[in-house]
Amino acid sequence: MLKTENISLVFNYGTQDENTALKNISLTINTGDFVTVIGSNGAGKTSLYNIIAGTYKPTSGQIFLKEKDITRMPEYKRARYIGRIYQNPLSGTAGKMSVEDNMVICHRKGYKGLGISLNNTLRAYFRERLAELDMGLENRLQDNVELLSGGQRQALTLLMAVLSEPDILLLDEHTAALDPRNAEIVMNLTRRFAERYGLTVMMITHNMSQAIEYGNRLLMMDSGEIIFDINEEEKKKLSIDEIVKRFRTLKKKELVNDELLLNL
Ligand SMILES: Nc1ncnc2c1ncn2[C@@H]1O[C@H](COP(=O)(O)OP(=O)(O)OP(=O)(O)O)[C@@H](O)[C@H]1O
Ligand SMILES: [Mg+2]
């Protein structure tokens, strides 16, 4: 379970450029939840992830993971418990390293720091796991990751995140940079892995259909706040039109262009 209590994040505090990215966010994510997160550009979605992952420390407030206060825990330590996948397929893996060497690193993370060296048993295990992606990567263990396509690379990043057995997985528009076919493949894998391994997931998306279709809860952010939080029952009945209507009613400032939110 992840819990934030009155989290605020203010950039350039006390200067002309002061900017409040998060305002008093109190949020509980239950184990096994798959939460989709939507909101226009600059709403604070990535900032919330930065606070959860420890990239930034909050200006005020606390954050708890499984009841433990991790507010001051540095990012590199949290990375053992909190997985994160970014939009850019290049950022989740080391391009100059082979597929298997990338996987060893994550596998070690799953064992929370115990040294594991690459041997044939582990190779066979990796091959088996890679086969689940259905992309032929089980035959490319020794290839450098930079040789893979964006979709293959993002699928590998997803698999590696799963292997490291995170308490929560943060997906930040992780299919937005892929072509539609690969985006769909990676989204299907996301759902399959989440179900099979009972992952706790937060997924930021600008795609309203995805936000409705995936997960058991939906959050909408605007101007650093969570302006609505919809549970599974309500979400099942929700339409894109309804989301847009609610957003128009609840948002704090006029957007220059509502289309920023609406990638249907
Ligand atoms: N390092 C930083 N320094 C100053 N301001 C920042 C920094 N990072 C984010 N911000 C500001 O915080 C606010 C929230 O940004 P954030 O990146 O969280 O938005 P977002 O919801 O992820 O938007 P997008 O959909 O465009 O990715 C914005 O006003 C942004 O300019
Ligand atoms: Mg963002």
Image (tube, rainbow, N blue to C red):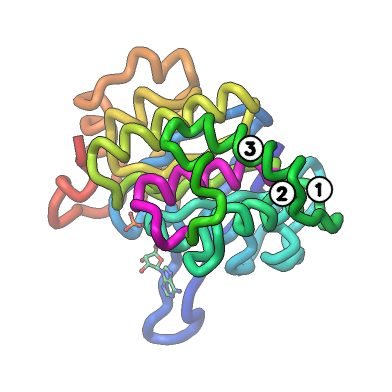
The residue to which callout 3 is attached is 28
Magenta stretch? 145-164
- CA separation, marks 3 and 2? 28 Å
| Circle 3: element type | strand
* Mark 3: few/some/many CA within 10 Å (<14, 14-19, 20+): some
Q: Is residue 16 left or right of residue 216?
A: left
- The kind of residue on which mark 3 rests is Thr
Quadrant of residue 1 within the rendered picture: top right
Towards the viewer: 198 or 255: 198
Quadrant of residue 241 within the rendered picture: top left
- CA separation, marks 1 and 3? 26 Å
Mark found first going from the N terminus, 3 or 2: 3
- The kind of residue on which mark 2 rests is His
Asked whether residue 152 is drawn in magenta, I would say yes
The residue to which callout 2 is attached is 107
Q: Residue at x 15, y 46 (%)?
A: 259
The residue to which callout 1 is attached is 111
Towards the viewer: 41 or 75: 75
Mark found first going from the N terminus, 1 or 3: 3
Most extreme residue toward the bottom is 15
Question: In x, y percent, where is residue 172?
Answer: 44, 50
- The kind of residue on which mark 1 rests is Tyr
Q: Are marks 1 and 3 in contact (CB under 8 Å)?
A: no
- CA separation, marks 1 and 2? 7 Å
| 104 versus 195 height, above or below | below
Q: Are marks 1 and 2 in contact (CB under 8 Å)?
A: yes
- Number of the front mark, 3 or 2: 2
| 11 versus 117 height, above or below | below
Asked whether residue 141 is drawn in magenta, I would say no
Question: In x, y percent, where is residue 135?
Answer: 42, 36
